[in-house]
Image (cartoon, rainbow, N blue to C red):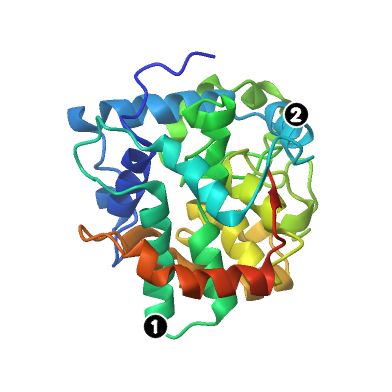
């Protein structure tokens, strides 16, 4: 499974989705006008993602990683570990991963949201440490989507699913596939990546709206395109109001001026003590 033509940094994917899912929402004709030469690495990334994200792959990765037995780190140590992902070749940002996270959480805090919402903003990309465990980019970032059922045409670069082995499994080719209508997303296997991983890291520590934000913040086919209403139940619909509230902070909070981490640290020390154990299991 080669990671050919890798993204120059994981931020390249985030910049792409920030453009594609810009506000206000684009028409379908406008939405599909992202296939240009400047996006060649992004196209290659999605080609790999859509080819290899199968139901079997996602289930194996859950079994491999959700035991959370690789590292025990404090929140600040986890941020230092995540900072190893900084790519000096990326011309668009000089910010560390920690500064990116803090920009998101500080934008949330400035708008007066609850402290657990602020913390969700701070940790939402922590799952990207998967790259530091040797996982390829296409298994860490990218739009997420349900597996075991027909792939929606509203997923970005949906044409690349033609190479996915799951497209040859007859049981997966209906709207609901292996699931029952409106079964609830708790019963659905999503594609594997940093969203699912951080959800498992935080699942015992944050309230449910925050966990929905973490688990589904890259599920753009639903929270921006409403493509999977047929799998969601009433509780999902209620919780997705929080996911949609979070999404603008995820996509549009980047600023060229970095936050003053040292100045803000006491606030976050208090926030971590309020919700998190002394050490996180990754």
Q: Left or right of 65: which side holds 268?
A: left
Element under disc 1? loop
Residue sitting at 27 percent across and 59 percent down?
Answer: 258
- Label 2 crowd bin: few (<14), some (14–19), many (20+), radius 10 Å: few
Residue 95 picture location, percent across and down: 29, 49
**Residue 67 higher or lower than 233, as above or below:** above
**Residue 54 higher or lower than 248, as above or below:** above
Residue sitting at 26 percent across and 34 percent down?
Answer: 35
Residue 175 picture location, percent across and down: 66, 46
Between disc 1 and disc 2, whose residue precedes? 2
Residue sitting at 31 percent across and 64 percent down?
Answer: 259
Element under disc 2? helix
- Image quarter hosting the N terminus: top right
**Residue 264 higher or lower than 44, as above or below:** below
- Quadrant in the picture for residue 183: bottom right
- Quadrant in the picture for residue 55: top right
Mark on residue 60?
Answer: 2
Can you identify the residue that label 1 sits on?
111
Which label sits in the foreground, 1 or 2?
Answer: 1
Q: Is residue 226 visible?
A: no
Residues 159 and 79: in front is 79
Residues 52 and 100: in front is 100
């Amino acid at each position: 499974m080669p990671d050919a033509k890798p993204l120059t940094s994981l931020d390249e994917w985030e910049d792409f989705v920030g453009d594609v899912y810009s506000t206000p929402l684009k028409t379908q004709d406008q939405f599909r006008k992202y296939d240009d030469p400047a996006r060649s690495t992004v196209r290659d990334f999605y080609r790999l993602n859509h080819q290899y994200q199968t139901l079997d792959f996602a289930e194996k990765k859950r079994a491999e990683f959700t035991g959370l037995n690789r590292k025990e780190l404090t929140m600040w140590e986890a941020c230092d570990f995540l900072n190893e992902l900084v790519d000096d070749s990326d011309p668009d940002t000089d910010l560390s991963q920690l500064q990116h996270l803090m920009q998101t959480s500080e934008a949330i805090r400035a708008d007066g949201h609850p402290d657990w919402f602020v913390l969700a903003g701070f940790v939402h990309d922590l799952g990207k440490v998967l790259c530091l465990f040797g996982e390829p980019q296409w298994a860490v970032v990218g739009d997420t989507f349900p597996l075991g059922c027909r792939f929606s045409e509203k997923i970005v670069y949906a044409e690349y699913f033609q190479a996915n082995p799951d497209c040859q499994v007859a049981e997966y080719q209906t709207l609901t596939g292996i699931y029952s209508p409106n079964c609830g997303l708790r019963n659905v296997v999503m594609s594997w990546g940093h969203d699912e991983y951080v959800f498992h890291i935080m699942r015992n520590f944050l309230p449910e709206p925050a966990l929905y934000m973490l688990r589904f913040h890259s599920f753009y086919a639903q929270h921006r395109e409403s493509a999977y209403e047929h799998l969601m139940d009433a509780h999902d619909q209620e919780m997705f109001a929080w996911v949609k509230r979070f999404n603008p902070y995820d996509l549009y909070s980047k600023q060229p001026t970095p936050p003053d981490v040292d100045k803000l640290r006491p606030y976050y020390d208090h926030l971590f003590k309020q919700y998190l154990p002394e050490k996180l299991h990754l």
